[in-house]
């Protein structure tokens, strides 16, 4: 075992890149909400890109280290301390038995991913380690982490890399493609969607983000025959306030869908907090596919990594070894 949970934070779960191929059987994909940050944290450690990690939401967790390992965190800006010393996220950090890892509140963004060398070890369900709390499957006993939980890592021979995650530049708008019922919405309604902004309400979770802003009215009503849902679908129920469906969404839905968030912009959307503004911009299906393909190539080709000049994380292994020798 490697980490013991001292404080679980607000909502911390084990996730990988998701559980696919079972939506027809009623299983939501789940998976890391910000796939880019999740993959980059694993990349820093030389892990497989799908190695299970911990997703912390808004308020980070704290852990006691039970076995020497290397960790890396990426995503929202959460203050990170190891034994009371501040460290940057986005770099590999050696940690030693007996140390205390503490994450603070998210100051920018909402989700931070903690990876450990070898990936966290949990029993996969339907081929995935991802937690889906509503159905109680996957991850650590199908639930959020609690104080006292102890979680280990796999046996994979990870090799931490001498890099840090570079600054990520984002466009302001969240790009969308027309949804399945786009034609049910008049030009006036489309101009409202794209011309005016929306705000994330407090009702935002892994299932979906409920927005507040201009009311959208569908011609012929908002109800449609129940259809399979997609990641990023912008559905408009009675009342006219859009809801963006996310990783833990229901597998089928019966509301008109005016748009779908381009997958390349899912990380940007899911890092927003309640009260943050959202502005939508329409792009073509072809452009959305090209942007996502380019993004995945950039992630996998190391396009978000640069040489790590964090002196403390380089010297920490040596200092840790000396400390243990002196304690003998």
Image (spheres, rainbow, N blue to C red):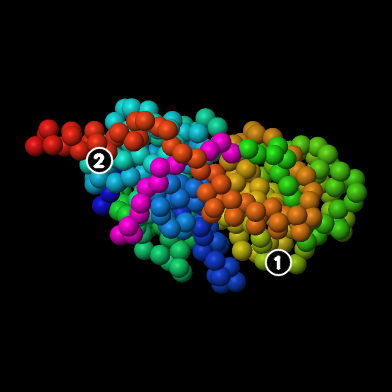
In the picture, the disc for residue 29 is: none
Residue at the (65%, 39%) spot, across then down = 170
The vertical placement of 21 against 101, above or below, is below
For the C terminus, give its image quadrant: top left
Magenta span main SS: loop
The vertical placement of 145 against 129, above or below, is above
The magenta-colored residue range is 155-168
Q: Nearer the viewer, mark 1 or mark 2?
A: 2
CA separation in Å, label 1 and label 2 = 50 Å
Residue at the (71%, 56%) spot, across then down = 290
Percent x, y of residue 143: 42, 53
Q: Is residue 160 magenta?
A: yes
Looking at the rendered structure, the secondary structure element under dot 2 is loop
Query: From this viewpoint, is residue 83 visible?
Result: yes
Q: Residue furthest bottom?
A: 25
Q: In the shown orientation, is residue 84 left or right of residue 204?
A: left
> 10 Å neighbourhood of mark 2: few (<14), some, or many (≥20)?
many
Q: In the shown orientation, is residue 152 left or right of residue 18?
A: left
Residue closer to the observer: 153 or 229: 153
Q: Which residue is mark 1?
A: 227
Q: Which residue is mark 2?
A: 96
Percent x, y of residue 276: 65, 34
């Amino acid at each position: 075992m490697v980490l013991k949970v001292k404080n679980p934070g607000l909502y911390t779960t084990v996730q990988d890149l998701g559980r696919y191929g079972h939506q027809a059987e009623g299983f939501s994909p789940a998976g890391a909400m910000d796939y880019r940050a999740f993959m980059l944290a694993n990349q820093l450690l030389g892990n497989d890109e799908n190695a299970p990690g911990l997703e912390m939401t808004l308020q980070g967790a704290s852990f006691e280290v039970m076995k020497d390992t290397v960790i890396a965190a990426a995503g929202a800006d959460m203050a990170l301390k190891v034994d009371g010393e501040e460290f940057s996220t986005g770099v590999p950090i050696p940690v030693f038995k007996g140390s205390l890892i503490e994450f603070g509140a998210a100051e920018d963004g909402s989700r931070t991913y903690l990876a450990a060398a070898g990936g966290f070890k949990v029993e996969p369900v339907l081929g995935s380690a991802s937690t889906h709390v509503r159905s109680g499957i996957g991850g650590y006993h199908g639930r959020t982490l609690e104080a006292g939980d102890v979680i280990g890592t796999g046996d994979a021979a990870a090799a931490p890399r001498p890099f840090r995650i570079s600054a990520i530049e984002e466009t302001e708008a969240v790009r969308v493609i027309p949804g399945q019922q786009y034609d049910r919405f008049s030009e006036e309604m489309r101009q409202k969607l794209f011309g005016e902004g929306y705000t994330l309400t407090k009702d935002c979770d892994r299932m979906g983000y409920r927005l507040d802003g201009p009311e959208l009215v569908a011609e012929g009503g908002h109800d449609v025959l129940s259809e399979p849902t997609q990641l990023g679908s912008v559905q408009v129920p009675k009342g006219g306030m859009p809801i963006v469906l996310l990783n833990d969404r229901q597998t089928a839905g019966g509301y008109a869908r005016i748009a779908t968030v381009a997958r390349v912009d899912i990380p940007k959307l899911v890092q927003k907090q309640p009260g943050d503004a959202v502005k939508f911009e329409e792009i073509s299906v072809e452009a959305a596919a090209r942007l996502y393909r380019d993004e995945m190539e950039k992630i996998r080709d190391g396009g978000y990594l640069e040489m790590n000049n964090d002196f403390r994380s380089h010297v920490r292994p040596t200092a840790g070894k000396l400390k243990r020798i002196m304690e003998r």
